[in-house]
Image: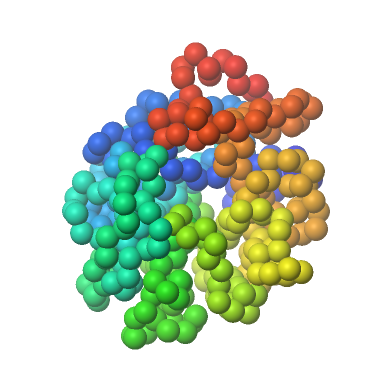
Amino acid sequence: MLFQDFLLDQHKLDNRYIVAPMTRISAGEDGRANETMKDYYERFAKGGFSVVISEGIYPDEQYSQGYLNQPGLANQQQLNSWKPVVNAVHDEGSIMIAQLMHAGGQSQGNIYTDETIAPSAVAPKGEQLGFYGGSGPFQQPRAMDEKDLEDVKKAFADSALRAKEAGFDGVELHGANGYLLDQFLTDYLNVRDDQYGGTVENRLRFLLEVISEVRSAVGEDFTVGIRISQAKVADGEHKWADGEKEAKQIFTALGNSPLDYVHVTDADGTASSFGEGTRSLAEAAKEFSRLPVIANGQLQDPAKAERLIAEEQADLISIGTGALANPDLPNRISAGLDLQPFDFEKTLLPKGYIKDHELNQTIKK
């Protein structure tokens, strides 16, 4: 089933493999994409992935940037810089989706401001990521006011339009891993007492408003998805307080929104996500949203991924670290070749992009 066709929105995919979004911080200091990034993304398309999702891209020149040397889609220069990247992926027969990410209180590097904003003035748990240039605890953010809320919604919509102009086939809203949209969903990070805080319904409100604004901006002929998780970058053990009950509320609401897909990520994409004997996160998303579901979480083993699709817990499989180690993973599996093991020092470190001389080693379609 991994090599069966699938229709994702209006895009016919020739297999179920997708490159997961992964922070790489190798853009220019001004947020422009570059030749190194073009080679990096192009190699996944050459390697057989039907869809390539970009690393998180910041959408505005205010509070959204999360890391120094993170790419943006906040202005025309950044937009133009993405065109060669997208064209290279298209030339190899794959589609490309831009992941739009507002870091919120989890920002650890922003060239536009030293201040961070979040739903509430609550600092994220844990420490900043050293291998992405951070150190020490996260600062306490400023609680967002009404103007901030409107500015952020507009930023997502405007950057989605820029993504469309740059040639991307769609956008994925980053609602996972402790970034801004996920901060609204998270009970201990969102202690607001207005219509955006308190109940699950209220904590979902801002996400749904962003989705609506983006859809209104880009129209019906552009793919719009969202990524969802329970865990955070700085709080990997976090679970939704009401488990499957909360999952049902979240995924049902997303399914009733104008989204085209839901992308879920967990430590193990096949494991029970809400306690022993419960659904996987992908299964919950599939059952309650009734949208196409992309599953992520240590799914490079084809038997494991195949089982998830055969059991109708997911429709598509996204690969992260396994793709860094094997940019040609779909072609390797199709050819019956062994996969290379993941090496942190070689392939996860942000500057660990492929070198030009390695391009010819990719097993092509």
Does residue 248 appear in the picture of this structure? Answer: no
Residue 228 versus residue 100 in the image, above or below: below
Q: Is residue 126 left or right of residue 139?
A: right
- Residue pictured at 44% horizontal, 65% vertical: 182
The residue sitting at the left extreme is: 113
Residue 104 versus residue 85 in the image, above or below: below
Q: Nearer the viewer, residue 178 or 40?
A: 178
- Residue pictured at 24% horizontal, 68% vertical: 142
Does residue 237 appear in the picture of this structure? Answer: yes
Q: Is residue 320 left or right of residue 66?
A: right
Dividing the picture into quadrants, the one containing residue 343 is top right
Q: How many labels were placed on the picture?
A: 0
Q: Position of residue 15 (x, y in %)?
A: 70, 41
Q: Position of residue 170 (x, y in %)?
A: 48, 50
- Residue pictured at 68% horizontal, 33% vertical: 330
The residue sitting at the front extreme is: 136
Tell me the quadrant of the picture where the N terminus can be found. top right
Tell me the quadrant of the picture where the C terminus can be found. top right
Q: Position of residue 131 (x, y in %)?
A: 39, 39
- Residue pictured at 65% horizontal, 46% vertical: 298
Residue 348 versus residue 265 in the image, above or below: above
Q: Is residue 309 left or right of residue 17?
A: right
Q: Position of residue 94 (x, y in %)?
A: 57, 36
Q: Nearer the viewer, residue 86 or 343?
A: 343
